[in-house]
Image (cartoon, rainbow, N blue to C red):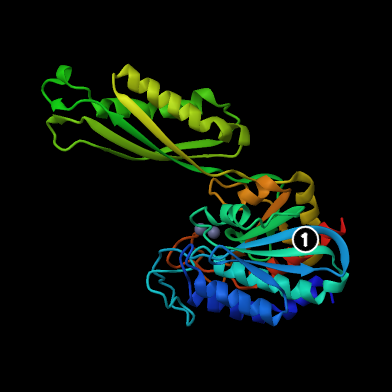
Amino acid sequence: MSVKALAAKYKDEMIALRRWFHQHPELSLKEYNTSKRIKEELDKLDIPYETIGETGVLGTIKGGKEGKTILLRSDMDALEVTEKNDFEFKSVNDGVMHACGHDAHTAILIGAAKILKELQEEIPGTVKLCFQPAEELAQGAKMMIEEGHVLDGVDGAFGGHVWADVPVGQVDVTEGPRMASADMFVIRITGKSGHGSMPDQALDTVVCGSDIVMALQTIASREISPLEPIAITVGTFNAGTRFNIIAGEAELTGTTRCFNPDIWAVIDKEIERVAVKIGEAHRCKVEVEYHKMTPPTINDNELAKLARESVVKVMGEEGVTRIEKTTGAEDFAFFANAVPSVFAFIGCANPDKFEVMPHHHECFQIDEDCMEYGAAVYAQYALDFLNQ
Ligand SMILES: [Zn+2]
Ligand SMILES: [Zn+2]
């Protein structure tokens, strides 16, 4: 049987699984029942696996012939969202919801495992099935790689996200940057408080902080090429206690996003330099705490072409779409940074069936047909990569 036919064969099982995961969502690093259910499914398929960390699962399908190794990855955590959908399989865990679609990802990877298991004898190499926790915290991929050594001996990786901006029946596997880096910074300013009527006797951190907020924007507009997309956002600015007291301390927090690894490598130094030097100009002390959280997710150019062919095989030419990259982030980037990789956006929107809501919305939903396509693309790409 072809991958396409096998995906159709397992469609209903995948939908049932996804509904179970949807009904029983668990927060990042607490995916205990999700992990248990994944292992039960792998047991049924006679696929060996190991547990990574507390909830990560790494299954292995060793093909009938020798060859390369590919890692297929799905994430499995839910969010602190109270579900407002009224499905019969609506979340039973109060305040927790699969509002990003990771329930579908988990079911898709189990579906791909079912397909590949049937084709095991023909597989020239090894397929690793990586069920990763804590994507929403951007911690799970790093943990799987650093503690679980899941990339040992792996030649390439593939991951995907069901995507509300793409209609069901289409998949994007465009080459190059697909998702941005996502970092977080804290800037602490120390001055000297005083009477609002006598600024000469104080060191005003509100004025200093305001200058820093504005100067940070000049990194984007004056320091980095206008051809390079970047976002530098200060999200909070806390200072002061009273209208007529000069604030002696202030704290700013913010995030940066970019797609170019060379910029990502230096953006922390640039923010620190600008903030500290502006602080000096105001005679204030400035400390910058910068957390590099997620690198940009970049698809390998050659493998993206291969993935396009895989999509065509299971969905036809009309199944391929190209969408603009997004400033959202994905910790799949840690895999893509380590081995040549492809990340797919799997269309799940269907305005004829439901009102399409953004990811993380309390009424987020998907067209479940996307799982058949998703599993087919995962499995077909694995075969194409190993046969290459
Ligand atoms: Zn999300
Ligand atoms: Zn997500």
Dot 1 crowding, Cα within 10 Å, few <14, some 14–19, many 20+: many
- The tally of labels here is 1
Q: Nearer the viewer, residue 350 or 387?
A: 387
Residue 191: x and y in percent read 24, 26
Give the quadrant of the N terminus: bottom right
Q: Residue at the location (31% across, 36% down)?
A: 251
Residue 278 falls in image quadrant: top left
Left/right of residue 118 with respect to residue 220 in the rendered view: right
Q: Is residue 148 left or right of residue 218?
A: right
Relative placement, left or right, of 262 versus 31 is: right
Where is residue 298? Give x, y as percent: 66, 45
- Looking at this view, is 122 or 236 the one in front? 122
**Residue 214 drawn at (x, y percent):** 38, 28
Of helix, strand and loop, which one carries label 1? helix
Above or below — where is 315 with respect to 245? Answer: below
Task: Quadrant for residue 366, please give it.
Answer: bottom right
Q: What residue do we see at 72% from left, 72% from top?
A: 113
- Which residue in the protein does label 1 denote? 381
Figure quadrant of the C terminus: bottom right
Judge whether residue 254 can be spotted in this image: yes
Image position, residue 150 (x, y; %): 67, 57
Q: Amino acid at mark 1?
A: Tyr
Question: Splitting the image into 4 quarters, where does residue 344 fall?
Answer: bottom right
Which residue is at 67% across, 76% downward?
42
Ligand 2: image quarter: bottom right
Question: Above or below — where is 42 with respect to 75?
Answer: below
